């Protein structure tokens, strides 16, 4: 963005004042946001301080992979000043698919650039576990026992708890320069299972959505989180492969539905999820009417614009950008709305870090004519931190 002076100031802060001292953090969030951010800053600046700090952080997390010798699945909550390691009680002390399956790009990149294969091995072991795991209906349930490696739930979702595992199958394949065919195969078979089992159409308008599966039946709802799937299918459709046309059609339809999630409300901002009710298309739920500036819809519109240059994606993006500016903007950032249909409600006094890392970045890229970041040259981690592909180790 040309913000070189701001970057230098941030660089000095990282060099002198960034310390990793939290006694309790989410392993996954720390990897995708902090480790991923440091590695991407290294990628784009080539300044070694970012790699050094990334290694310092990763070294404080490595013990999390040693707690369950049979599976190597890392704990979900860890300490950066000790070796406390926990799995959340609300999951029945299970490991979470979207968490242990969305740390691979970061650890592999660190391994490659430090030459230390141990960072590669800890996350590749998880991929081997997934490759061999039983896949009900060709899909991956959201919880796994870290001690035995068996699934502890039957729920399957492209929303919370499942989402970015699927994204990292195709992104890992691209990230290692398409040299690891097993990742493409794992992605294609999961992507086709999603299309066959979870993809539904609403009535009366026939909007495409991705339902959840609870082990016995479909739940006709779609998290805003699941809107990333449009970008995922689009990125997977660029290889001249067998399923490119189907993937692009699905990506287009998901991008359209996710736009409806915004235009369907009074503020023009999407709720956290929508229910699909027969005869009424999509309905904002009373249990989650809030918007916290999530990025997944604009992520899909950006990828679709990049690959198709269809102006409709920019038009959608602009409409939603204006809604954010109108209802979420404050003098210091975009804040959260507790109810997207009640714009007079007092707004929350906080902004998630993904608003700048992802949402605003995707808006910027959607309208940037110069494309400094080319999707042919970079793979974005799930927090939108660009990394250049590496050779497998
Ligand atoms: C982000 O932190 C990442 O995109 C993650 O994969 C899922 N959720 C948030 C934003 O909604």
Image (cartoon, grey):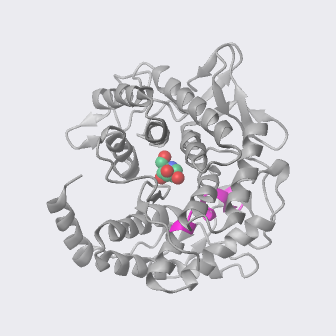
The percent position of residue 133, horizontal first and vertical second, equals 80, 64
Instruction: Say whether residue 93 is magenta.
Output: yes
Relative to 338, say whether 177 is above or below: below
Which residue is rendered at x = 85% and y = 40% of the image? 216
Residue at x 23% of width, y 70% of height: 11
Q: Position of residue 58 (x, y in %)?
A: 47, 78
Give the quadrant of residue 275. top right
Q: Is residue 4 left or right of residue 344?
A: left
Left of 239 or right of it: where is 266? left
Residue 126: percent from the left, percent from the top? 68, 71
Residue 94 shows in this picture:
no
Residue 383 is at least partly visible in this image = yes
Name the side, left or right, on which 18 lies relative to 126.
left
Question: Is 222 located above or below residue 362 in the figure?
Answer: above
Q: Is residue 207 magenta?
A: no
The answer to which image quadrant residue 127 occupies is bottom right
Q: In the image, which residues are magenta? A: 91-105
Q: Is residue 271 left or right of residue 91?
A: left
């Amino acid at each position: 963005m040309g913000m070189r002076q701001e970057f230098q100031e941030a660089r000095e802060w990282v060099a002198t004042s960034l310390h990793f001292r939290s006694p309790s953090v989410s392993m996954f969030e720390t990897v995708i946001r902090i480790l991923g951010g440091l590695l991407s800053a290294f990628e784009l600046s080539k300044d070694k301080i970012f790699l050094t700090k990334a290694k310092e952080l990763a070294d404080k997390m490595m013990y999390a992979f040693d707690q369950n010798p049979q599976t190597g699945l890392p704990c979900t909550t860890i300490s950066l000043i000790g070796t406390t390691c926990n799995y959340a009680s609300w999951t029945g002390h299970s490991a979470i698919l979207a968490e242990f399956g969305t740390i691979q790009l970061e650890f592999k990149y660190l391994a490659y650039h430090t030459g230390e294969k141990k960072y590669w091995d800890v996350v590749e072991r998880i991929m081997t576990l997934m490759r061999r795991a039983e896949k009900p209906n060709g899909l991956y349930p959201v919880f796994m026992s870290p001690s035995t490696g068996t699934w502890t739930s039957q729920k399957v979702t492209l929303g919370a708890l499942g989402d970015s595992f699927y994204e990292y199958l195709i992104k890992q394949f691209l990230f290692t320069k398409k040299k690891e065919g097993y990742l493409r195969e794992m992605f294609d078979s999961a992507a086709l299972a999603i299309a066959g089992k979870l993809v539904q159409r609403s009535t009366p308008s026939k909007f495409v959505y991705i339902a959840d599966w609870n082990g016995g039946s479909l739940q006709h709802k779609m998290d805003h989180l699941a809107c990333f799937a449009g970008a995922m299918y689009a990125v997977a459709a660029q290889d001249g492969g067998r399923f490119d046309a189907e993937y692009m059609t699905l990506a287009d339809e998901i991008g359209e539905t996710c736009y409806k999630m915004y235009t369907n409300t009074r503020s023009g901002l999407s709720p956290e999820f929508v229910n699909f009710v027969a005869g009424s298309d999509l309905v904002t739920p009373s249990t989650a009417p809030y918007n916290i500036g999530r990025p997944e819809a604009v992520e899909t519109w950006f990828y679709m614009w990049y690959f198709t240059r269809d102006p409709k994606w920019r038009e959608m993006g602009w409409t939603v950008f204006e809604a954010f500016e109108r209802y979420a903007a404050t003098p210091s950032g975009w804040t959260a709305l507790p109810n997207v249909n009640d714009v007079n409600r007092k707004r929350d006094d906080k902004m998630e870090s993904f608003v700048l890392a992802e949402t605003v970045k995707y808006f910027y890229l959607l309208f940037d004519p110069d494309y400094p970041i080319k999707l042919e040259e970079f793979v974005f981690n799930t927090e939108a931190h660009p990394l250049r592909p590496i050779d497998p180790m």
